[in-house]
Every structure is written in structure tokens, then in C-alpha cells.
Amino acid sequence: MQITPISKAFFDQLADAASAAILPHFRTALAVENKLEDAFDPVTVADRAGEVAMRELIGATYPDHGILGEEFGNTGLDRDKVWVLDPVDGTRSFIAGIPLWGTLIGLRASGRAVQGMMAQPFTGERFYGDGVTASYTGPGGERLLRTRPCSDISQATLFTTSLRPFSDSERQAYLSVEGQAKLVRYSADCYAYCMVAAGQADLVIEAGLQPYDITALIPVIEGAGGVVTNWTGGSAADGGRVVASGDRRLHDQVLKLLAAGETASAGASGVIPTSRG
């Protein structure tokens, strides 16, 4: 079944609307709320204002589309086309004044992540992909995005945001990969995936993701020549445990290493690990 894509211009319109709502709050003394009782999951007026702006524009332009959003819930998830929105991916960086955050705008069609954009208002950068091609616009000009070749973990630059969402077995499996990587960086959120697409890094390994954390990024990395799956090689569109790689050879190697790491962890603890994604 052929899917008629939404124009990139509309993604830019959504990014413009979100940026206008979010950017005035960056590096200000804004109030921070916690969405959880037993952990810290921050949200601010910027998150909410950005999502409202995008929802209003989608509703006015494509009233027959569904929306899955981080801040205001879900509508029309049974519809063929569903927008998946995270107005501020990396809220912890946002409230700390660090520009490693972005607005994620994803589109699912028939359940697949088919188009996506990461927009960073402060730096003026946008990373867009449709699963076939991917492009960058920003201070560095305009260019196509391409991942770089990297066939072995020993030569890879690896990102993860935080180990806190990992279970004990997932953490041990991840660390078994991290220990073999050439370079490891933390706390980049959506920027990590865009750096893989841009050929600046090779690998992202995460756990505990929500659909709005990853949907927009899948078409960007795939359009740049990379691959995104869950830890067992299946779809990552629903979040959970995610691996994104610039090189299929590296990806296959890492999936095997993660599986072996979890098996070893289970053997040491006597517990059989269960998948969260």
C-alpha cells in the first residue's frame, strides 16, 4: 500500500510553532513540576505550550489524523495517520540550560514510523527524514545526512542518555557493550540519534523509552542509511529497549553482545530477564 507523504514544509510549520512557544522559556527561572511520585520526571510550561501549538496546527490542517503526545494524551490512535509529539525531548537538559534537547515531530502511517523531524530552536538546527533520505538545515547550511561506516564496536562512538531506566540485567548487558566501545558519551537524548544520522557517532543504546521518544528519529536515521530496532531486532516504534546504528554490521554485532550480556547476567543472578520493549 502506497503512503502519500506529508510535505516537509508542514513539519517546518510545526517546528516553527513549537519553537515560538518553547524558546522564550529557555534559560529562564521557570517553574518545574514533577510528573512522578517515586522518581523525577520534569515538565514545564514550555513542554505544554509547545505541544499545544503543534496540536492546534495539526487539528486545523489534518483533522482526520490522530495524535500521540507526551503532555496531553492520545486521540485517534486507530486512525491511519498518527502524529507522535514530544515538544521538549531532554527536559532535564532544558531546565539545566544545556541545549541538548529538541522538539520531536513524528508521523506514523499504518503503524509505521514514516516521517520525522528533530528541531532545536536555540541552535537553529533541524534534522528531517522520511526513511529513504534525510537532511539537515542549520548554521552549517543545508545538506543530506549520511551515516558513516563502522563495522566493529571497538571503533564505535556510543551514546546513551542515562542508565537509570535500565533494569539490572539490561544495565549489565549495556555495560558489556560500553566496555568495548572506543568513545562513550551520556545525556544527549535526541541529539545522540541525530549525530548517528549525521555520521558523527555510530551507536545509541537505550531502555525505557516511550513512543514519543523515538518515533520521529527512526525515519531520520533510516533515511540516512542507518538502522533502528529494539534489542531483539524487532520494531522500535513503540519505544522500550532501542538500538540505533549507522552501520548494519555494527548493529548485528551489538544485538548479539546485548543478548549475551543479558544471558550472562541472568545466569549470575538466577533471574530470567523480561523484555520491556
Image (cartoon, rainbow, N blue to C red):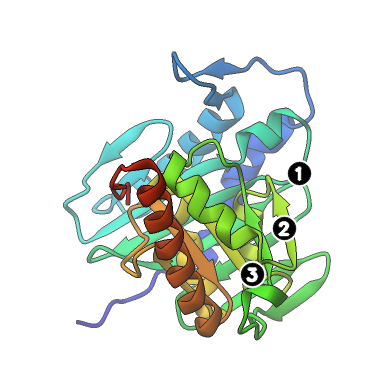
**Which circle's residue, 2 or 1, is located before the other in the chain?**
1
- Identify the image quadrant of the N terminus: bottom left
- Secondary structure at numbered mark 3: helix
> Residue at the spot x=35%, y=70% of the render?
233
| Amino acid under disc 2 | Val
Q: CA distance from mark 3 to mark 1?
A: 18 Å
Disc sitting over residue 99 in the figure: 1
| Amino acid under disc 1 | Pro
Disc 2 and disc 3 in contact, CB within 8 angstroms: no
Return the x and y of residue 113 as percentages of the image width and height.
36, 65
| Relative to 207, 65 lies left or right | left
Q: CA distance from mark 2 to mark 1?
A: 19 Å
Asked if 26 appears above or below 172 in the picture, the reply is above
Q: Residues within 10 Å of mark 1 (few under 14, many from 20)?
A: some
Return the x and y of residue 35 as percentages of the image width and height.
46, 20
- Secondary structure at numbered mark 1: loop
* Residue pointed to by mark 2: 184
Give the label, 3 or 1, closer to the camera: 3
> Residue at the spot x=28%, y=47% of the render?
272
| Amino acid under disc 3 | Val
Return the x and y of residue 188 as percentages of the image width and height.
68, 49
